[in-house]
Image: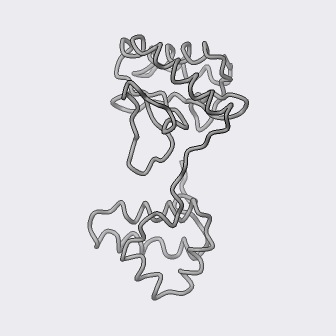
Amino acid sequence: MNPNVDWFFDKDTKWKKEYQKLRKIILECNLTEELKWGVPCYTYKKSNIILIHGFKNYCAALFYKGALLKDTNNILIQQTKNVQSARQLRFTNLKEVLELKPIIKAYIFEAIEFEKAGLEVQMKKTSDFKIPDEFKIALEHNSELKTAFYKLTTGRQRGYLLYFTGAKQSKTRESRVEKSISKIINGKGLNDDFKS
């Protein structure tokens, strides 16, 4: 246990009992407990294995390289179609956590073996992501924008492409592109100005 993480488990939340049980199960697998991104994260030789987090309707154990897990029980969830590596085990009550304890541990030990073997999830390249027509047109008509976009890191490029394609209507995509032009030209990612 890490005293820097205790506050997360001590606070009064809807998922307090589930969080505490998940912590106990994970720590039984000899992982190091750290605080990352404001939630408990468990590592093996400094490599992220699993974290605990919660939402309105469920709490979850998230496996960083969950896409590699065999998941013979078919219980891992890909949060959105754009999540490439991570997979969640979701819980809505303590009973579910208790029932899945042996499976949680088995998945953790499998994830540790992946780290020992140096396995990585094959991620899609930025070039594999669709560039929506609305953004293609903007790039064709604005050479400064085009140059700036391709100077961004691949992660920032992906962020914009996912943001643009996430809109169902062309008008919304156009609006998103228009609002992002100055940020792109200034070398900023989609969330670089985000204040939490």
Question: Residue 22: x and y, percent?
Answer: 50, 18
Question: Residue 174: x and y, percent?
Answer: 35, 74
Q: Residue at x 28, y 72 (%)?
A: 170
In which quadrant of the rendered view does residue 36 lie? top right
Question: Residue 51: x and y, percent?
Answer: 55, 30
Depth order, front residue of 148/4: 148
Q: Residue at x 41, y 26 (%)?
A: 72
* Relative side of 86 to 34, left or right: left
* Relative side of 136 to 9, left or right: left
Against 127, is 56 above or below? above
Q: Quadrant of the N terminus?
A: top right
Q: Residue at x 46, y 13 (%)?
A: 101
Depth order, front residue of 59/78: 78
In which quadrant of the rendered view does residue 147 lie? bottom right
Q: Residue at x 59, y 38 (%)?
A: 37
Against 168, is 26 above or below? above
Against 48, is 2 above or below? above
> How many numbered dots are placed on residues in this image?
0
* Relative side of 154 to 78, left or right: right
Question: Residue 76: x and y, percent?
Answer: 41, 31
